[in-house]
Amino acid sequence: MFDTFSNPQFLATGILVVCYLVLFTEKLNRAVVALLGASAMIFCGVLSQESAIAGIDFNTISLLIGMMIVVGIAEKSGMFECAAIYAAKLVKASPRGMLAALALITAIFSALLDNVTTVLLIVPVTFQITRSLKLNPYPFLIMEIFASNIGGTATLIGDPPNILIGSALNLSFMDFVYELTPVVALCMLILILIFDFFFGRKMQASTADKKKIMSLDETECITDKPLFIKSLSVLTLVIAGFILAEHWHLQNGTIALFGAAVLMLLYTFGDNHQKRDQKVTEAFNMVDWTTIFFFCGLFAIVYGLEETGILHQLGQKFVEITDGSIKKATFGVLWVSAIVSTAIDNIPFVATMIPTLKSMEPSLGGREAMMPVWWALSLGSCFGGNGSLIAASANVIVAGLAQREGHPISFLRFLIWAIPVMILTIIISTGYLYMIHFI
């Protein structure tokens, strides 16, 4: 009995299960849970401190920190609010047009920034616009939740699961764009048409209220024009760097940190010593350190399972279940990822799945043959984030902002749309993956 409890595989599995259960209850801060779990892996002898640190993917950490700083500084210029108001005016303040326009803006920003930052920027503007037009903000809010999770799927940096997968497989920014943008665009088009049918065509606003929106000056949102120019320039160069990274043989984390350093240099250039240091400190405070340390702890926990061989055994079991068929593995991973990601945070799920799928590659023909399975993991985990109000961080944030504005989004009311949308997008993904890889 004692030998069983002291077995590294038993210990590693027990630590992971306990951490997942606590994360699911949301009783403790997720960074605290992950760091306690990582420490337990070391204290129990599953990992040494050196191997725990070696298990951390610093490319992912660097990419997250760099983009958080760049987006945080750029936000100060007001560029994102400017874009949202410009889009509203572009459709002549038509409620029907704005439902589609704000959804597209949300999807595009989620792909180029990240979905959590995007909803934090877009939702307040949405309330401003719907108040002016005397519209119910609910259709706009749930549409923006869906658009943020779908749009974030299109690129390497749009959603944390993609960051994890891209870093683990050394995939480029353009690999994600080429493979996933078509299905993301198709899902967004269908979603906009559905919401237009159920909500958009029924929305009405008076001429006077529309004039209020048309009278808004989007340039007034630009609170710091020099910073706007600097931020836009650096953000453009960083995205270009991601696109060209594979040709330069650079990691995306290096490009993101370099972009953050350049923008901090431009942001503080010409300031005196005290003000410069204050601004740099503020820039580093824009980093969501809770998320960063959550990732660090999670990497160590998953590495403990990988080192004990458990994930390899799970991978081989999955190979047996799918009879060694890439097609069965692809659609199995797609649907399982979507269903699981509806119930729990997709980040720890994907972090656990990555080494499991890697262990399957030799039995299923290698990395190239396994790529449909990897794309299925991305689509399933990201689109599964639309399955419930707690399935993705962006969903929780929108619900919180809506509650503050007096327009609460209940869990069950959201499910009425969430489950059908999640299932529809996974069905579309199933057809897409079949046509692209198996015909």
Image (spheres, rainbow, N blue to C red):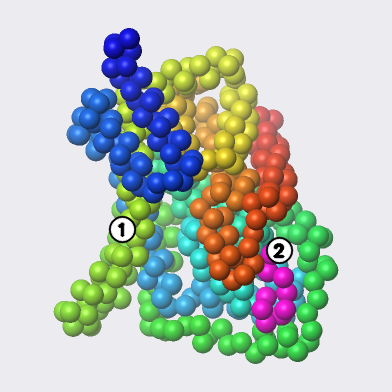
Q: Compared to 243, does 310 lie above or below? A: above
Rendering quarter of residue 261: bottom left
Residue at x 55% of width, y 14% of height: 320
Label 2 sits on residue = 139
User: Could you say whether the residue bearing mark 2 is in a helix, strand or loop?
Assistant: helix
Query: Where is residue 126 drawn, in percent x and y?
Result: 62, 72
Q: Compared to 193, does 133 lie above or below? A: below
Residue at x 69% of width, y 64% of height: 138
Q: Is residue 345 magenta?
A: no
Residue at x 60% of width, y 51% of height: 389
Residue at x 40% of width, y 36% of height: 19
Q: Earlier in the sequence, mark 2 or mark 1?
A: 2
Q: Is residue 424 left or right of residue 27?
A: right
Rendering quarter of residue 52: top left
The 10 Å Cα crowd at callout 1, few under 14, some 14 to 19, many 20 or more, is many
Label 1 sits on residue = 257
Q: Compared to 249, does 50 lie above or below? A: above
The reply to whether discs 2 and 1 touch (Cβ–Cβ < 8 Å) is: no
Q: Nearer the viewer, residue 361 or 211?
A: 211
What stretch of residues is rendered in magenta?
Answer: 130-138
Query: Where is residue 329 drawn, in percent x and y?
Result: 58, 25
**Viewer-side label of 2, 1:** 2
> In the rendered image, is residue 342 in sight?
yes
Query: Where is residue 219 drawn, in percent x and y?
Result: 52, 85
Q: Amino acid at mark 1?
A: Leu
For the N terminus, give its image quadrant: top left
Q: Amino acid at mark 2?
A: Pro
Q: Is residue 132 magenta?
A: yes
Q: Is residue 192 left or right of residue 66?
A: right
Q: CA distance from mark 2 to mark 1?
A: 37 Å
Q: Is residue 425 left or right of residue 218?
A: right
> In the rendered image, is residue 265 in sight?
no
